[in-house]
Image (spheres, rainbow, N blue to C red):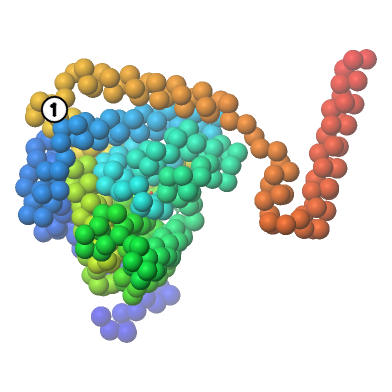
Amino acid sequence: MGATHLPSTEFDGTEVDEQREASAETVLGGPGVEMVQLLDVDGKLGEDEVYSSYAKRLDPEKLRGFYADMAAIRRFDQEATALQRQGQLALWVPLTGQEAAQIGSGRATQPQDYIFPTYREHGVALTRNVDLAELLRQFRGVSNGGWDPKETNFHLYTLVLAAQTLHAVGYAMGIQRDQQLADAVGSGADAAGDAGERAAVMAYFGDGASSEGDVHESMVFAASYNAPVVFFCQNNHWAISVPSTVQTRVPLANRAKGYGFPGIRVDGNDVIAVHAVTEWALEHARSGKGPVLIEAFTYRVGAHTTADDPTKYRELAEEAVWRAKDPLDRLEKHLRTEGYADDAFFEKVKDDGAELAAYVRRTAYDLKSPDIRQSFANVYAEAHPLVAEELAWFEQYSAGFAEEAADEASEDAR
Ligand SMILES: Cc1ncc(C[n+]2csc(CCOP(=O)(O)OP(=O)(O)O)c2C)c(N)n1
Ligand SMILES: [Mg+2]
């Protein structure tokens, strides 16, 4: 294409649409596009040269655990959505459809790893033992976060798209330097022998966020410094109303090649494959071989948030295609055909889900609003005259309402 083909002021986008259509197959998946899959949609376990050895580490108990986790987080998601509809939460960000991507990757992490989520990683939170009821605090607007990240190495949710990818790489570089120091004084985990004891970082982000400059800068830095970080992109096909075909002309995993580290597209609705690929990537990062990009190819079955209506921008038929690839159904088929789980197991999972939902409901009803003065106290570490002045004004303003209420009450009494 020459300069004469550059868009003019009469640019109508037709050419771009045509290009997008031409590259859709590689973005949306097609026969020629590589993707790691172990469990097919019928729940049959296939073979993979590299990743089957990881899948073989999973005994029936672990697989049942994956199912129980995915069912629990789906039930939690339904409950939180209902709480938002009842006015208990200001907003909710549903994860339905992405359970395998989150449980598979989260369960591959070790306690010493550090996780930087976006705002939808409720399933990963579960795997890090974050009290799920705590996740609701931010969405009710009673906390800036909700949990102590140091307790679980699960960072607070980041709503500014992709910002956490930079934090993750910085953190990974910190881990790397601490390790170098420990190695120098002879107290560090041995790189060859104890790579499993070393720490790595996981940075979660979405297909939409992948277009942010922050992601590009993170990847450049991660490659330049060989940081122990795994970039985990959940390509759920949509960034609110913008389809993934607008974000990229190639599978997102392919971008890693340009930075010079491995990129893997994995079936994000196949919990066994996601777990295997993430374990491989974390081992790679922990053993000093540098970053990896994983693209979990999945789908956001519900709305972007409870403030969104996907019928305005996508076809129901597309949702139906993805419902047929449901991550829970697929693992259930596998567990049943292999004789790893029976009706009693699935009944118990359901009962546990109801119990979790009741707990979450109870806790949500009990969430207390913080004292507004706390917001003023949070502005600076030390007292500040301007903040004190604003607080004084605010208190005087609030007191006006108390006087108004008292006047109304005495009028009513007359
Ligand atoms: C820097 C920035 N720009 C825009 C937004 C508004 N916004 C919130 S979510 C979202 C879409 C993100 O899509 P994706 O990265 O695919 O993640 P998903 O929500 O699908 O999980 C946008 C544009 C934001 N939060 N931050
Ligand atoms: Mg998305």
> Is the residue 192 above or below the residue 86 in the image?
below
The image quarter in which residue 216 lies: bottom left
Q: State whether residue 175 is above or below residue 100.
A: below
Badge 1 element: loop
Give neighbour class at mark 1: few <14, some 14-19, many 20+ (Cα, 10 Å): some
Residue extending farthest to the bottom is 3
Task: Say how many tags the image has.
Answer: 1
Instruction: Work out whether residue 61 or residue 7 is closer to the camera in this orientation and state it.
Output: 61
Task: Tell me: 80 left or right of 28.
Answer: right
Q: Position of residue 254 (x, y in %)?
A: 23, 65
- Residue at the image point whose x is 45% and y is 35% from the top: 131
In percent of the image, x 93 and y 15: which residue is there? 414
The percent coordinates of residue 84 (x first, y second) are 50, 32
Is residue 279 found left or right of 339 in the rendered image?
Answer: right
Q: Residue at 35%, 33% (x, y): give it.
A: 73
Q: Residue 267: image x %, image y %? A: 20, 48
Query: In x, y percent, where is residue 7?
Result: 37, 76
What residue appears at the point 40 percent right and 33 percent down from the top-left corner? 77
Where residue 230 sits, quadrant-wise, is bottom left
Relative to 169, does residue 133 appear above or below in the rendering? above
Viewer-proximal residue among 346 and 313: 346
Is residue 382 visible in this depiction of the protein? Answer: yes
Give the residue number, with chain letter if any, for mark 1: 340
What is the quadrant of the N terminus in the image?
Answer: bottom left
